[in-house]
Image (cartoon, rainbow, N blue to C red):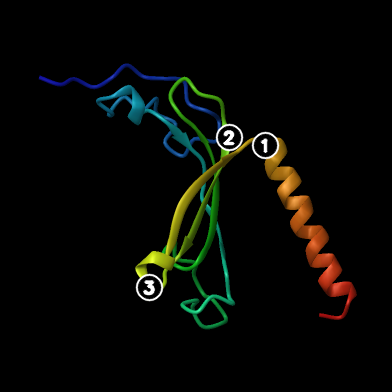
Amino acid sequence: MTTAAETVHCEPWCVDGDGHQREHYRRDQWCQGEIIKVVFGLEDLAPALPIATVDLSEPGISVYPRRDWHGLPYVALNVYREHSNEFLAIDTDLRVTAAEARELAAALVDVANVIEEAGG
């Protein structure tokens, strides 16, 4: 007989916030915050503009805070892109620290500024 695990302390940003007591295994007791999705409009299978509602199955990056059981909080990034050739499709998760996420965000803004300043 399998019983539910003891509750864990949830992060303030955890969308469940209930201690995850319904989970049977410790490895399933993880906190996740709200998912923010940025759709890549230049990808072949991107939806037509304007995008009324964002679907997680659209090509792009999803970001959210996460903390695994007895782990440190991190920023989770899921890069997703379908492709007609299954070997070229991407669906992978990356883990970065909050400092690395800020560094990445600053680099993206810098590159976007270079493009805009050049009139692109």
Amino acid found under the numbered disc labelled 1: Ala
- The alpha-carbon separation of the residues under discs 2 and 1 comes to 6 Å
State yes or no: discs 2 and 1 in contact (Cβ < 8 Å). yes
Residue ID at (50%, 79%): 44
The residue carrying mark 1 is 98
- Residue at x 87% of width, y 80% of height: 119
State if disc 1 and disc 3 touch (CB < 8 Å): no
Name the spot of residue 115 as percent of width and height, x first. 82, 72
Q: Secondary structure at mark 3?
A: loop
- Of the numbered discs 3 and 1, the one sitting upstream in the chain is 3
Query: In this picture, is 78 found above or below 33?
Result: below
Q: CA distance from mark 3 to mark 1?
A: 34 Å
The secondary element bearing badge 1 is classed as: helix
Give residue 112's quadrant in the image. Answer: bottom right
Which x, y percent locates residue 114?
A: 85, 68
Tell me which corner region of the image, top left, top right, bottom left or bottom right, holds residue 99: top right
Q: Residue at x 57, y 70 (%)?
A: 40
- Residue furthest out toward the top: 6
Q: Amino acid at mark 3?
A: Asn
96 shown above or below 44: above
Where is mark 3, residue-wise?
85
Q: Is residue 38 left or right of residue 84?
A: right
